Image (cartoon, rainbow, N blue to C red):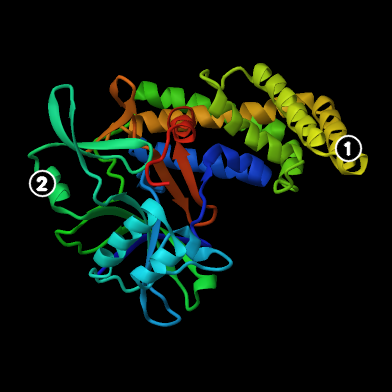
Amino acid sequence: MFNFKGFVTQDKNTHLEHLEDDIINRGAVGGDNAVNFLKSVRNMLAGTGDTANITVKWDGAPAIICGINPENGKFFVGTKSVFNVTPKINYTVRDINKNHGGVVAQKLTVCLAQLSRLNIKGILQGDLLFTNDLKDITIDGEKMVSFTPNTITYAIPKGSNLANKISKAKMGIVFHTQYNGKKMDSLSASFGTVQGSSNRNVFLASAGYKETKVMFNKGELSKFDAQIRMAEGSLRKAAPILNLMSKNITDDLSIGYRLKTFFNHFIRNSNSSMDKVSVMQKQFRDYFESIMQAEIDKRKTAKGKEKFIKAKKDGLQFIDKNKQALYFAIASHITIGLAKQTLLQKMSQVQSIGNFLRTSTGYKVTAPEGYVAVDKVAGAIKLVDRLEFSRQNFTMPKGWN
């Protein structure tokens, strides 16, 4: 039997936002949410509170959704395509081969065979860690059992109890979300830790974060609190423009939408850190102008170009007119990211499985992908080192895709 500990927060878990992006998505409210999240985790690591519900974000892939369909009582497995407008729900191997192909179909076939034997009563979502792709590797002279579901390679010393358990399993998965509801298209998601009974064929990793042995010292607290004060100061000055940008955040021609994509563009294409606000501000203007010009150049007729010419003109005028406000908006995003990084550096000291990145010369030690912080009101937010993990995730090939 599986049990769940966490908060019911929102609809289906198809995408989690980065903490710092919440200020662009939801304006000043998002800024308050981000700061409150940071303070909550800070209090936990300072030993003065336990208000943050934190789970470890394993770098698993693909996402697996499985359980009993409340509409027909049948067990199913699937990917996030379970929640498509035309759902891909798999009850049999035949369904899997019809709806999927390649490696994904192979992995879903293993999931169907093994997860159907667990006593799953509701619907769970997790990240697949391995099926038949475990590898023996050697790192710094030590033999290890490893799996690389996405970007990060997880390695466990060979011969250890954990390595023996993993080696005997036919698959590994970490569950982090539970769904409730009477219809598949109206399920509500609960984020947190999901625990249950596995068997020798299924390795169930835990998403729970154990912080008991890692605490902030006085110097670390002082550094973090200074970052929070800077974030709060810049957010107060940026609030009006953040609220304005959040109103049309889904419009791909808007400044808010493009500011958000700019940060991802920067991570993909730059090896430097996001710390020079004035430089980032100029780069954003250049990025917006080039994106709009590319859209203009794609169109062959004057009528087709018209909308994008206007969007480019209006957007550049907005950027130039609101230089100071945009400066503080970008500063807020960067400062929240730096404060988040301070937390991640401390939290990543708690590890039972080694985390590595494959490089051309071997394996490089890295931190976990990140964590998910859950708030009863605001929902779930990713705490991920974007300049480390996200850049690798954008650029490294995915064996399961």
Percent across and percent down for residue 235 are 65, 33
Residue drawn 32% across and 74% down?
121
Viewer-nearest residue: 235 or 77: 77
The answer, for residue 247, to whether it is visible in the render is yes
Percent across and percent down for residue 116 are 27, 70
Residue drawn 11% across and 37% down?
158
**The residue positioned farthest toward the bottom in the image shown:** 72
Query: What crowding class fits label 1: few (fewer than 14 Cα within 10 Å), some (14-19), or many (20 or more)?
Result: few
**The residue positioned farthest toward the left in the image shown:** 159
- Look at the picture and state if 133 lies above or below 267: below
Q: Which comes sooner in the sequence, label 2 or label 1?
A: 2
Q: In which quarter of the image is the N terminus?
A: bottom left
Residue that mark 2 sits on: 164
Viewer-nearest residue: 23 or 355: 355
Q: Is 80 on the left or on the right of 312, as rendered?
A: left
Residue that mark 1 sits on: 310
Which quadrant would residue 231 be assigned to in this image? top right
Which secondary structure, mark 1?
helix
Percent across and percent down for residue 292 are 78, 33
Q: Is 348 on the left or on the right of 95, as rendered?
A: left
- Look at the picture and state if 203 lies above or below 40: below
Residue drawn 71% across and 39% down?
256
Amino acid beneath label 2: Asn
Viewer-nearest residue: 181 or 302: 302
**The residue positioned farthest toward the right in the image shown:** 302
- Look at the picture and state if 135 lies above or below 247: above
Which quadrant would residue 327 be assigned to in this image? top right
Amino acid beneath label 1: Lys
Percent across and percent down for residue 337 are 52, 31
